[in-house]
Amino acid sequence: MVYGMVSTAVGQPFDTTKTRMQARPENFRTGALETGLQLFRAEGIAGLYRGALPLFIGGGVMRSFQFGFYDTALRRLRAGQAEPPARVLGVDPQVFAAGFTGGLGRGLVEGPVDFIKTRRQVGMGWSFAGLLEAGLPVTLLRNAFLFASFAVYADWSKILVPGGLGPFWTGAVCANLAWLTIWPLDVVKSQMQSGNYKGVPLSTLLLDVTRSGRLFRGLLPGLVRSTFANGTAMVAFSHTKKSLELRYGSGRSSTF
């Protein structure tokens, strides 16, 4: 819960800028700074926090689903095994599968939340009918690969860096690498949810952003948001976890 609330408070202005760059035709040629300043001049700080309320309400729940689904899946995959399975191209397949499951768990909550957030960010209205049409399916797809990538990079960080990166840099570095891995899916997700591309299939949008050079549109504000939001949120998550373990005991070990 803490992870989701902190990441929203820290990162929402950058996320709003990123989404408008990706999904508003008016901002297809404006840079991150210009896009953010335009909105700030027109609406003030409230404009930069467009769509934050759904995330404040659902952000903690969706992150809890994410880590809960991940830990449960990994424990079950590891049950009865003396050693982890052989790696495939350096990737632990059980970590990837658990991450994929965690992303799906998060997407069940984030699909409706993200749909409303995106519509608010780009200044479009929304309806419940759009939740299934453009909210849930594309968010499930993006989140599954996003958190699977995050879990793999976090796993690698423990191998490559003795003692680990620490909470802030684990959250920041691994999240940024995960976003870089799936960013084109995020661009298309924003466009499908915005209401500006009704009826256009995902494959067509992917082809269009590839041809137009917008495959990594909004990357700079997205990575800035990810660095501060996921870094600080992981610190808050780590401190909260330690406090709960001191009070109630460690219980079952957590992956992160």
Image (cartoon, rainbow, N blue to C red):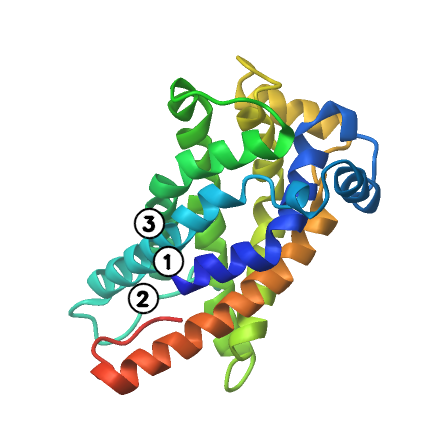
Residue 27 place in picture, x, y as percent: 77, 30
Residue 147 place in picture, x, y as percent: 45, 53
Q: Quadrant of the N terminus?
A: bottom left
Residue sitting at x 41%, y 64%: 2
Furthest toward the top, the residue is 199
- Viewer-nearest residue: 2 or 19: 2
Judged from the image, the secondary structure of the residue bearing numbered disc 2 is: loop
Measure how far apart labels 3 and 2 are at the Cα level.
18 Å
Label 1 neighbour load within 10 Å: few <14, some 14-19, many 20+: some
| Whether residue 49 is situated above or below residue 197 in the rendered picture | below
Residue 132 place in picture, x, y as percent: 38, 24
Query: Badges 3 and 2: C-beta atoms under 8 Å apart?
Result: no
Q: Tell me which amino acid carries mark 2.
A: Pro
Query: Badges 1 and 2: C-beta atoms under 8 Å apart?
Result: yes
Does 43 sit left or right of 59 as displayed?
A: right
Residue indicated by mark 3: 101
Measure how far apart labels 1 and 2 are at the Cα level.
7 Å
Residue indicated by mark 1: 93
Q: Tell me which amino acid carries mark 3.
A: Thr
Residue indicated by mark 2: 85
Q: Tell me which amino acid carries mark 1.
A: Pro
Does 64 sit left or right of 225 as displayed?
A: left
